[in-house]
Image (spheres, helix red, strand yellow):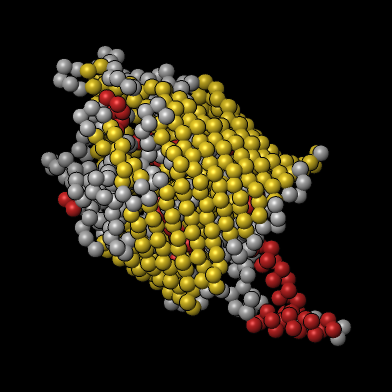
Amino acid sequence: MEVMTDPRGHAAGGNGKGYGQGGSWRKAAAALLACTALHLPAPAYAQQAQEDEAAAEETTLEQIVVTAGGYEQDIRHAPASISVVGSETLERKTIVDISEAIRTVPGVNVGFGSDGTRGISMRGLGSGYTLILIDGKRVNAGATTLRHYNGDFDWVPLDAIERIEVVRGPMSTLYGSDALGGVVNIITKKGSDRWTGSLTSEFLFPSNDLTGDKRRLSGYVSGPLFEDTLSLTAYGNISKKDSGNGALSDGVSVPDGSNDVDITARLTFTPSDAHTFDLEAGYNRERYRPWLDPASTSTDSQTEIERATASLRHTGEWDFGTTTTTGHLERATNTSRLTDTEISVRTYTLDTKVVFNPIDYFWTHNLIAGGEIRHEEMDDPANLGRYNSVTGTAGSPVADAFTGALFFEDEIRFTDVFRMTAGLRYDYHENFGSHFSPRTYFIYDLTDALSFKAGWAQAFKAPNLRQLNPNWVTTSRGRGCGAVGGPCEMVGNPNLQPETSDSFEVGLYYDDGAWQGSLGYFYNDIKDKITSARVATLILPDGRKFVQQINVDRARSQGFEGGLTVPVHADWTWSSSFTYLLESKNLETGMPLSADPEYSIHTEVTWQAREALSFTASLDWYGKQVDYVQNPETLVAQNVSPYSVVNLSTKYDINDNFAFKAGVNNVFDSQPNSESNYTENGRTYFVSLTGKF
């Protein structure tokens, strides 16, 4: 469980110092009682202790989130199933990337693709249904590639992350397309009114060559340039990871090595208490190894993905509420030295929202409204510019699309214990027209600590620029060919409609300031799922098959998820979570939607042995799951045997300025059985040193 802080940054609940839960508080309480009995003025320190304790108790019960409702809310009353991974958790363990950080969240599965790349699947829907945000801004670099990409999980160093909010379930009302399965919002640290920073060096040493070594240096700095007016925040990362040795994986693809560089800077201008401007620019590069000489005849991956971003955000406090307006530009390129091609995607976004002050009209209303316009342009000569044997034409390598949206949500507090959130979003896409996404969510406080939650939402996922283009032709090695088997050529279709879903969830959330727990049931029904046709559109004399993308499938996932945090002792905390998938399949073909386990259990114990020393042990258990294997005619699903992963770590605060971490991930070097299509990172030893000022 994350330790909450009061507005001054002090740990809520105390730590045996000052006026926390230790002897100083008892001394202050005794003095206060004595003075009361004698009718004497209370000592100042006793009064302060009482105030601090009351504030601590209040803030302990409130963990603030923004992703579920678009504005700051207590997590207990957020209209969604949401989990938070805080900076304390990130600092306590060694995490390879963001996907590892959220792997233990209920309903979330981190799997590997057919070429060793990763994806985040929520509630059995697959990684293509998860939207990644950084400070609420959409990340779209993955649109440049179909393979050899580790996902949008490593653009921000852990030193710069304040928390990660994970919303499970459809969020199209607030965020539009791609949020059908859920949202991961990486929230960075805000600017500081005094100079502060950190620098972390980290080394990961696997016990064998199945997993490559990794070295990483990351840093964060923030402080005022002009007091109370202008501040600077900057963070960056340099890392190098060696390729895994595929010869040790029984033919299963292992992740390529990579050289990464990331740097971001943000200027925050506060001309008055009511207005804030954030100007931000960033550059990221992922170079997948081996990055060989262009004259090399090697067929290994030689891919470089570059991402450049710029944004300007204004936040204004007005008599009627708070407005936030953001202009955001992202340009991503994927360069292949092997094929001498470059794919680029440019995304221009302007969005604004208004969070109105509470309105009392029959009941209390917390209303949010806003809109978004987005233009996306893709230049893909490797796929969009190829000759299409089905149409007999060669298309333009450039495709673009304009979308616009309006949305509103209203949280209605009928009573102090019963509230409802109702929302509606209107989206316009120039290629397939208009679409509406409504949702309704109810929260009823059964007690001061226990809340009942239930909700329904409709969501959609728009076809991407490739799928909508009739001249998109991309070679698939098998999975993309569907029932006709591979290899084949996947072909776009301008008549595609967006996938739509009806989703329901119901559950309980408990938080008394010490114990935390949740238990819920979810149900997702997806219509017009985009997939490859049942039969080949064209078969050439050489046997090559052309398969068009179509809307035919209906899919469904349902299951249970939950979590529990138990303060076993003042120095011991035990946290667990689980996901149980009742089903996750294509109802037309009976095939699984993704390689998600039938059930997964994560349990973790942290021992605060000393104020400066902690130990953490965790167990991740993955039950029977499915994966795809290929035969000459079709793709079929197979069962993958259960397996578990054990991790150990320790953190030692040497002094106020230096902290040391060490441990072992995947202690027993566990792997899925050899028939599966992916590998886990093998047993890996790690050490890291962080310096702070």
> Residue 50, relative to residue 149: is it above or below?
below
Q: Image quarter for residue 687? A: bottom left
User: Farthest residue in the right direction?
Assistant: 39
Vertical order, 409 against 563 (above or below): above
Q: Position of residue 215 (x, y in %)?
A: 30, 60
Q: Give me the residue at 52% from left, 67% from top.
A: 573
In the rendered image, residue 624, in percent from the top left (x then y), is placed at 36, 47
Name the quadrant containing residue 464: top left
Q: Position of residue 124 (x, y in %)?
A: 43, 41
Looking at this view, name the residue that lies furthest to the top: 392
In this orientation, which residue lies closer to the viewer: 571 or 161?
571
Vertical comparison of 343 with 506: above or below: above
Q: Residue at x 64, y 40 (%)?
A: 441
Q: Residue at x 40, y 71 (%)?
A: 650
Q: Nearer the viewer, residue 501 or 382?
A: 501
Q: Is residue 407 visible in this depiction of the protein?
A: no
Residue 187 falls left or right of residue 315 = left
Please state, as top left, top right, bottom left or bottom right, where the N terminus lies in the image.
bottom right
Residue at 54 percent across and 58 percent down: it is 564
In the displayed structure image, the side of residue 408 where residue 636 appears, left or right: left
Of residues 562 and 49, the one drawn nearer to the viewer in this rendering: 562
Q: Is residue 676 visible?
A: yes
Residue 664 occupies quadrant: bottom left
**In the image: residue 621, left or right of residue 477:** right
